[in-house]
Image (spheres, rainbow, N blue to C red):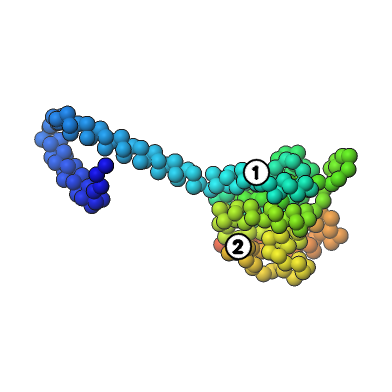
Amino acid sequence: MEVQKRSTITNGLRSLSSYLKKLQRSGDDYIRLNIESANRLKNIKTSIASKLANDKYKKKAHSKPHLIDDIKGKVYECEKIRNLGTLREKLVFSSGDPESDIMFIGEAPGYEEELKGMPFVGPSGQLLTKIINAMGLNREDVYISNIVKFRPLIEGPDQGTSNRKPSSEEMSVSLPYILDEIEVVKPKVAVALGGTAMQGLLSINGPLSSARGKIHDAHGYKTIVTYHPSYLLRSKSPNKDKRKLWEDMLMAMQILGLNISEKQKNYFK
Ligand code: URA
């Protein structure tokens, strides 16, 4: 293999190109080459084609969906998570668009999520979808994930539809993966849903109410905290709590640089 300076090759190709154009203008469409030059030309063509294919492959391998898939594979194989023995078998990873500017992070999948293999598809997920729509976004356009990727196990003959919050050990073993997801998605804003996600992601142990309304830092990314949708479903003063959650979403929209209409400003007031 012979190494040449890029500029030498570029200059050579430029002169060759202007020579070929000149021939073409004079109506000369065919060029006679000796065997050695013809073979060299073929080799150059093959090596450029393989370089382009290689670049395309590399680009694909570094695409966000591909990188998210890699993380999913790592979670599936994670011995530390499996060895806990306190989580169920079925992996429930993320959904939505890893190219999104906004990421919603919950605590762990529940019964419905395990059934469908997708985060936030039960009653609280349906409310989350409504919140996303109220922001003027579609569910498919945002990235949704959980800190813990397996439904927490409740010992006994049949867990049925019962769910439990993940323990701090389950969260700390799972944390590296959600941080990796944040690193891939690179959201303009991440939203931690509920106190458990807040504790796991931001190590804040105080009440959620005092962490709201501030921009926190998760792994170098702007993160806000708000109520878990399931809290709103159980709330005794739903309108008051909906407004609080909505104020958090207005803050997220501001960070995203979205237009906020008068109607949106006044929701649940
Ligand atoms: N609650 C969560 O935190 N995550 C889900 O996926 C569903 C409910």
Give the residue type that dot 2 points to.
His
Please tell me whether mark 2 sits on a helix, a strand or a loop.
Answer: loop
The outermost residue toward the left is 26
Residue matched to label 1:
77
Q: Is residue 214 above or below residue 34?
A: below
Picture residue at 84% right of the left edge, 58% below the top: 235
Q: Which sits in the foreground, 241 or 36? A: 36
Relative to residue 223, is residue 209 drawn left or right? Answer: right
Q: Is residue 72 above or below residue 30?
A: below
Relative to residue 108, is residue 157 drawn left or right? Answer: right
Q: Which sits in the foreground, 206 or 244? A: 206
The x, y position of residue 195, in whole percent, is: 76, 61
Residue 28 in which image quadrant: top left
Residue matched to label 2:
219
Picture residue at 55% right of the left edge, 50% below the top: 99
Quarter of the image with the N terminus is top left
Alpha carbons under labels 1 and 2: distance apart? 24 Å
Residue 246 in which image quadrant: bottom right
Relative to residue 170, is residue 98 drawn left or right? Answer: left
Picture residue at 62% right of the left edge, 66% below the top: 217
* Residue 223 can be seen, yes or no: yes
